[in-house]
């Protein structure tokens, strides 16, 4: 596939966005050396742009093609929550494969709101976090809106 030479990279576009909006961009790219069998050089890339000087939310991008876990690529808006690092909490949109997997039901945490639970998958190691952050109907609406993006 040929790309026009004047086409900007995603990093160039995001750097311009950060500059125009008086934000800072932090980007790192670490190459994984190729091998004799595979001469392609892969890169681990990390990017984040704080929304403001208070660092209340971030645009974050991460790609690690050699990652052996489920999070080899993600990009989105993140905000810090006052959660100890020993706790884990992940939320995502439910898809049709979730209905087919009989083992996933053991790992899923519930909010006891049938409509919200039918549209999301929440996993983690502390049900009290789910109750604390997702029991409010307005929070649930915001989460569902963000999962549509």
Image: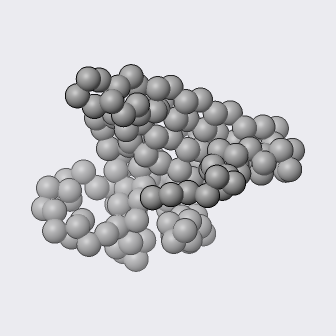
Q: In the orientation shown, which residue stands out farthest toward the left?
A: 102
Its colouring scheme is: one colour
Where's residue 128, x and y in %?
A: 42, 47
Say which quarter of the image contains residue 104: bottom left
Which residue is the extreme one toward the bottom?
115
Q: Which of the pair 96/123 is nearer the observer?
A: 96
Which residue does the image show at 64% across and 39% down from the upper left? 48
Snapshot quadrant of residue 126: top left
Judge whether 55 appears above or below 74 on screen.
above
In the image, residue 30 sits, relative to residue 137, either above or below, namely above
In the image, taking residue 103 as reference, residue 88 lies left or right, namely right
Q: Foreground residue, 33 or 63?
A: 33
In screen coordinates, is 81 left or right of 67? right
Please tell me which residue is depicted at 40% across the width and 25% down the height of the picture. Answer: 32
Horizontal relation, residue 54 to residue 39: left or right: right
The residue closer to the viewer here, 51 or 118, is: 51
Q: How many marks?
A: 0
Is residue 56 visible in the rendered structure shown here?
no
Image coordinates for residue 97, horizontal then vertical, percent = 23, 67
Q: Position of residue 137 (x, y in %)?
A: 55, 70
Q: Quadrant of the N terminus?
A: bottom left
Image quarter where the C terminus lies is bottom right
> Which residue shows up at 38% across the image and 43% down it?
71
Q: Is residue 93 above or below residue 50?
A: below
In this view, the residue in front, 40 or 132, is: 40
Q: Residue at x 55, y 35 (%)?
A: 46
Q: Position of residue 23 (x, y in %)?
A: 81, 42
Q: Is residue 6 visible?
A: yes
């Amino acid at each position: 596939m040929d790309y026009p030479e004047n086409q900007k990279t995603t990093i160039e576009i995001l750097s311009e966005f950060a500059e125009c909006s008086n934000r800072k961009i932090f980007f790192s790219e670490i190459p994984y050396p190729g091998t004799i069998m595979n001469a392609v050089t892969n890169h681990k890339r990390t990017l984040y742009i704080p929304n403001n000087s208070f660092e209340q939310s971030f645009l974050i991008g991460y790609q690690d093609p050699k990652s052996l876990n489920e999070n080899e690529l993600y990009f989105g808006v993140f905000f810090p929550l006052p959660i100890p690092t020993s706790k884990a909490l992940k939320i995502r949109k439910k898809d049709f494969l979730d209905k087919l997997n009989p083992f996933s039901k053991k790992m899923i945490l519930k909010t006891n709101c049938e409509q919200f639970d039918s549209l999301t998958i929440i996993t983690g190691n502390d049900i009290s976090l789910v109750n604390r952050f997702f029991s409010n109907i307005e929070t649930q609406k915001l989460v569902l809106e963000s999962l549509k993006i």
